[in-house]
Image (spheres, rainbow, N blue to C red):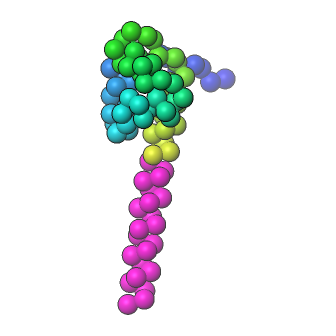
Amino acid sequence: MPTMPESMNGDEVRRRRKALELSQDGLARLLLVTRQTVYSWERGLRTPPGMLALALEAIEKRKTWSALREAMQKREGALDVERES
């Protein structure tokens, strides 16, 4: 049975948000919380829920897959142009 992830600290929340190139407002919208909540997590005023780590992992994976899909589409487009030449 999966275990609940450990709670993240504010520095980890900030680091992962920035790695995703999201503003506090952008992350808040994805997580369906307020910007003030994200601010409070990052400042250590509130403890982020344990599930936050899982949510951020899902966002990171989605972003990675989106980037991969985009790169593959560009490559396929370039190959189509080469075939037409």
In the image, taking residue 55 as reference, residue 9 lies left or right, namely left
Residue closest to the eye, 54 or 26: 26
* In the image, farthest residue toward the bottom: 85
Residue closest to the eye, 25 or 12: 25
In which quadrant of the rendered image does the N terminus lie?
top right
* In the image, farthest residue toward the right: 1
The magenta stretch spans residue 73:
yes
- Vertical relation: 39 (above or below) 21: above
Q: Position of residue 44 (x, y in %)?
A: 36, 11
**Residue at (52% x, 30% y) in the render:** 31
In the image, taking residue 12 as reference, residue 61 lies left or right, namely right
In the image, taking residue 46 as reference, residue 31 lies left or right, namely right
Q: Position of residue 78 (x, y in %)?
A: 39, 76
Q: Position of residue 24 (x, y in %)?
A: 38, 29
Q: Position of residue 64 (x, y in %)?
A: 44, 47
- Vertical relation: 54 (above or below) 20: above
Q: Main secondary structure of the magenta part?
A: helix
The magenta stretch spans residue 77:
yes
Which quadrant of the figure has residue 85?
bottom left
**Residue at (42% x, 19% y) in the render:** 36
Q: Which residues are magenta?
A: 64-85
- Vertical relation: 70 (above or below) 83: above
